[in-house]
Image: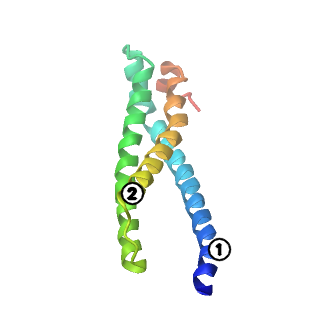
Amino acid sequence: TALGQYLLIRVSPLMGLGAIVSVVLAFLASAQIGLRNAALRAGTWAVGRALGWPGWVPTLCSMVEAGLVGLIAGVVGAGLGAAVGDRLFGTPLNGTTFAAAVVVIVGSTLLAAVPAALAVTRQDPVTILRGDAG
């Protein structure tokens, strides 16, 4: 039908663009939250590094935390999206699409956490503990 063709041509690309924009905005929000979290935990990580932790331990802690938050957000977000999509549009979400959505969300959260994780490990622990770090 003409309505079906119109929706396929006009609405589908807009939905794709909306999905891309939402992933980019979520990525930027995750990066900002990760940087703030790293700034708040810098003292704790500096004490650990001053006591002999290898430099990768704070990075690993930050990445594991980001991965868990991304996994929870991915499952909840994709689940809510599936429920709303099924309820409003009558299109159930299959397992492959659900898994792909979770992988994209976890991947973008981990990618956004990299600058925050590396920010603390590149600073001198003594400088962080003195409060001179910027």
Q: Residue 83 shows which numbered tag?
A: none
Q: Amino acid at mark 2?
A: Phe
Which residue is outermost to the top? 52
Q: Quadrant of residue 44?
A: top left
Q: CA distance from mark 1 to mark 2?
A: 24 Å
Mark 1 or mark 2: which comes first in sequence?
1
Q: Residues within 10 Å of mark 1 (few under 14, many from 20)?
A: few
Residue linked to disc 2: 98
- Say what secondary structure mark 1 lies in: helix
Direction from residue 19 to residue 37 in the image, left or right: left
User: Residue 80: horizontal and vertical position, in percent?
Assistant: 36, 66
User: Residue 30: horizontal and vertical position, in percent?
Assistant: 50, 48
- Say what secondary structure mark 2 lies in: helix
Q: Residues within 10 Å of mark 2 (few under 14, many from 20)?
A: some
Q: Quadrant of residue 101?
A: bottom left
Residue at (47%, 49%) from the top-left corner? Answer: 104
Direction from residue 12 to residue 128 in the image, left or right: left
Residue 48 seen: yes
Residue 35 seen: no
Residue linked to disc 1: 9
User: As rendered, which of 19 and 98 lies closer to the eye?
Assistant: 98
Quarter of the image that includes the N terminus: bottom right
